[in-house]
Image (tube, rainbow, N blue to C red):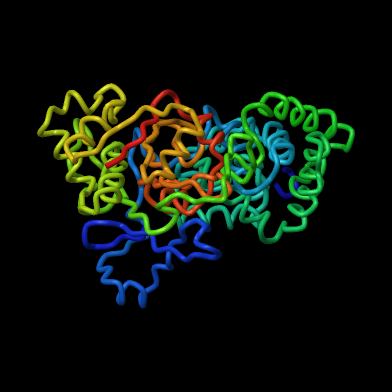
Amino acid sequence: MKQLSRFLKKSSIWLFLSVMVASAGLSPAKVIATDATFRSLNDIQFFSPDACRVGGGEGTETLVGNDNLEKILRFFVGKGLTLVQASGIAGNFKRESGFNPAIIQGGAIADANYSPVNGVGFGLAQWTFTSRQKPLVDLARSTNRPIIDLQLQLDYTWQELSGPYARSLENLKQSTEPGNAAYVFHRDYEGSADTEEEVRRNRGGDAIAIYNDFKEKIPDGSTTTTSSSTACTGTGKASAFVDGFTVYNQNDPQWNDAAYGASTIGAAGCGPSAMAMIITNLTGQTVTPLDTANYGANHNPSTLYNNGISGSLHNVHEVIGEHWGLSSTYVGKDVAKINQGLRDGGLVIMAGSGAAPFTEGGHFIVVRAVTAEGKWLVGDSNGTAGIENSKKEYDPQFILDMVGSYSWLLTK
């Protein structure tokens, strides 16, 4: 671009996602806004929008992908663009920066304290002039992130596309072919000195190659799970826990820093957090992530915690569940079996890695319900992201594509 270029936390011992049922009790749970009036009426004594960051290992709240290119694609697909349109953006970013958010025009690499210079391109899109650079700097400062942060620059790109470059986004959304998407994004957002022929050949060619490389890996809507699947087995009957489900946040200050193996519950405790949700909801007892993590430590930490991966072993359901009187049955990736178990009143613990509601490094979640239409609802302990993920409906096959072999139904 040479010219342009909740933490909802209940201060007692659990985080509860309140539900607003839109029709017949079948819509996903919604979190009530955490304004001052609501907190006062509901005895929420502590609230911090920054208190939900998850540390390294499982539960990490990060962009999803094996490299910057995949993270860029998944980011824009998660915003509602098709993979075709996201590939058009990526084709431009490849030519501008090689997907390196620290690149300075000419090839130098910026450090975290770099200040963009008017007339010198910088970052993913090579923002060149003060009119485009200053808002990026302002966003970095207001969110306390380094200017070379990939997530920051993607957020800024979306900020521009949602504001001063909204027409660019509208036009991009009309694109149904990656080469044309690259041309449109260049014409309306990038605006380099490249000719139309050069843009279509180079940026368009890159976009086509990127699309072909990822079309089997990143389905449209994959991070919002809006696609349908033959794996959905709607029967007209929703299971229990479509609403009224208690979700724990592993970053709750009451246990965020508590030890779990060689780590902490906040950084690596999604396993015991998932089991705490299951026990609390199935038994009616109040059992927190601190309770389940402490039991694992007192029982025999070497049978529950894996130092090599900084997280739980795949027997967390057995070690913890049996202590609270729960039975477990292996259900694997059998959608019909899982749905029947949910409709019979059980809950399923799964482990996987990839897009939300999982994480790149690996994450345990609870599949808490199946809707009448055959979609799944989850319980996710992963901070602010977990709150949002726990409100969404997911296509079962999307979830199962990221699950290895760990999938167990727990019942009373």
Residue 411 at x, y percent in the picture = 31, 40
Q: Quadrant of residue 62?
A: top left
Left or right of residue 306, residue 91 in this image: right
Relative to 41, residue 96 above or below: above
Picture quarter with the C terminus: top left
Whether residue 181 is visible to the viewer of this picture, yes or no, is: yes
Residue 350 vs residue 66, the one in the foreground: 350
Whether residue 193 is visible to the viewer of this picture, yes or no, is: no
Which residue is painted at 36% across and 36% down in the image?
Answer: 349
| Number of disc labels | 0
Which residue is painted at 20% across and 36% down in the image?
Answer: 260
Residue 333 vs residue 128, the one in the foreground: 333
Left or right of residue 24, residue 378 in this image: left
Hey, which residue is sitting farthest left in the picture? 298
Residue 145 vs residue 11, the one in the foreground: 11
Hey, which residue is sitting farthest right in the picture? 197
Which residue is painted at 49% across and 61% down in the image?
Answer: 25
Residue 306 at x, y percent in the picture = 25, 24
Residue 259 at x, y percent in the picture = 17, 39
Q: Quadrant of residue 310?
A: top left
Left or right of residue 66, residue 6 in this image: left
Residue 405 vs residue 100, the one in the foreground: 405
Which residue is painted at 39% across and 32% down in the image?
Answer: 351
Relative to 386, residue 304 above or below: above
Left or right of residue 211, residue 360 in this image: left
Picture quarter with the N terminus: top right
